[in-house]
Image (cartoon, rainbow, N blue to C red):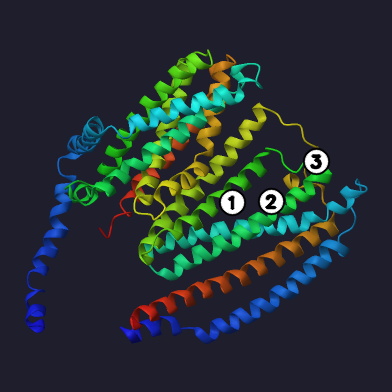
Amino acid sequence: MRSAVTHSYSVGWRSLDILQLVLGMLAVAAMTISMWAALYYAPPASNLAGDEQLAQRIFYIHMGCNIGALAGFLMSVIGSIVYLVKRDLDWDRVSQAAIEVGLICGMGTILTGMFWAKPTWNTYWTWDPRLTTSAITVLVYLAYLLFRNGIDNRHTRARFASIYALVAFLSVPLTFYSARLFRSIHPVIYGAENVDAQGGFSVGPTMTQALQINLLGFCILFSALLVLRWRQLRNEDAVAELREEIA
Amino acid sequence: MSKKALSVEPQPTPPVHIDLAAHPITMRLDGGLLAYLSKVAAVFAKDVRAELRGREIFTTMTAFGVLAVLIFGMAFDLRVPRSEMIAPGVLWGVVLFAGVLGLNRSFGAEVDRGTLPSLLLAPVDRSAIYFGKLFANLFFTLATAVVILVVMFFIFDLNLFQPYNLLAVLLGVTGYVGVGTLFAALTANNRARESMLPILLLPVMVPVFVAGVALTAGVLDGKAWEELNQWFGILAAFDAIFIVVAFLLFDLIWEDA
């Protein structure tokens, strides 16, 4: 028994250390370059002035956080499905780590969006489908973490959390679709400024470069945080198992 | 002693193991669709009978629903000129919140009384338990919704007993208990059962809530089928997707029980 436990956790220790170190250094470099690209390299928007001109630089960080949230929630679905098929707790840890990092990115998306919306739309919040969906999604995954807390058995927790993660993920597109239909029937008046809806459509070439740098930078940051958190969770479980053995 | 016990134990297990592999499947799925439906009906009848004797689901939900309608009526009375403005939100909000109470009892009562293991021992497919519970919850929640509609008729002076609105309530509540029954089973043994179910369930229910509010508002505004059918489409899609998903996942919940 004992050797089985230590064995399962010692495999790949060294290579994971190196991976984590490399990813961490890459993330620091990537975030430095991303901030430089967002704040200096990207040109000022041609049609804006004053507060709006300053605030439009949030766009790059806003989209970066958004890609992190998306990656986290997609990763959690993969982790949940693979866990339910293979019953390997490592994949449940992938799910949990991805959702935790995704939640931070999701909250970052909402916060940066609100700070950007105040000077641009003159309100922190509207019931735009994107805003509605992002808020509900963050609530869904907060519930996921609370739900895990209430289950003691490690395998039951992993199984129940995977089931919930799958059902919750499926509800997100329906939430977006219904929120969009709701708004089109009850129009909400908000500024015509809707850069993130149009993607590269209204964004110049240097802006596109800055955006791509930021998206890549946040993807690297996401990976570094994911690996770090995943290893933490692994260590936690390893310590818990050792404790049980001693007891 | 221990060596003897060890050598005796494995002998009965292999034949039992083979039996387990062969028998439950024939017992569980024997007799085709009609037999399956009769098993679903048996679980449903058990829940209804328990409710008739214990009176803890429907009565709690209805008492809460009536109370909530009265509270909303008082809260909005002075500020809202016409009750049509808030009625859709009140109806769906109250149905969702009242429904949680019943769903909590659906498996919570089985855990509290210690009857869950015997329910799981029943020689039926686990999905039959799911559908039996689903129909029981649907029955209780729809009955509660009817009472809420009656109370709203008097308090808000609004007749919401219109065909499209009733269809919206039927489809919305179906999707609601479809997911709710699965989540109630997931939270039945959770340390924070009573507070966990609404936190899990309500964010997933946003499409149902939004579509329900839009439909009730549309009916009150006298809209035609052409303006409402997209919302019915959302509700129908929600019901179909999530009942199928719950049917597929329900088997996994008690696989170690």
Position in image of residue A66 (x %, y %): 67, 55
Residue B207 sits above or below residue A154 on the image: above
The subunit letter for the residue under badge 2 reads: A
At numbered mark 3, what does the secondary structure look like: helix, strand or loop?
A: helix
Q: How far apart are the two marked residues, 3 and 1, measured between alpha carbons?
A: 22 Å
Q: Earlier in the sequence, mark 1 or mark 2?
A: 2
Position in image of residue B219 (x %, y %): 54, 18
Which residue is tagged 3? A121
Q: Residue at x 75, y 75 (%)?
A: A29
Q: How far apart are the two marked residues, 1 and 2, measured between alpha carbons?
A: 9 Å
At numbered mark 1, what does the secondary structure look like: helix, strand or loop?
A: helix
Residue B79 sits above or below residue A154 on the image: above
Labels 1 and 2 positioned on one and the same chain = yes
Question: In this view of the protein, which residue sits in the foreground, B123 or A118?
Answer: A118
Q: Is residue A66 visible?
A: no
Q: Specify the quadrant that holds the N terminus of chain B.
A: bottom left
Q: Earlier in the sequence, mark 3 or mark 1?
A: 3
Q: Amino acid at mark 1?
A: Val
Which residue is tagged 2? A110
Which residue is tagged 1? A138
Q: How far apart are the two marked residues, 3 and 2, measured between alpha carbons?
A: 15 Å
Q: Amino acid at mark 3?
A: Trp
Pointer 3 local density, CA inside 10 Å: few below 14, some 14–19, many at least 20: some
Position in image of residue A9 (x %, y %): 43, 81
Residue B116 sits above or below residue A81 on the image: above
The subunit letter for the residue under badge 3 reads: A
Question: In this view of the protein, which residue sits in the foreground, A230 or A11?
Answer: A230
Q: Residue at x 55, y 22 (%)?
A: B73
Q: Earlier in the sequence, mark 3 or mark 2?
A: 2
Q: Residue at x 54, y 84 (%)?
A: A15
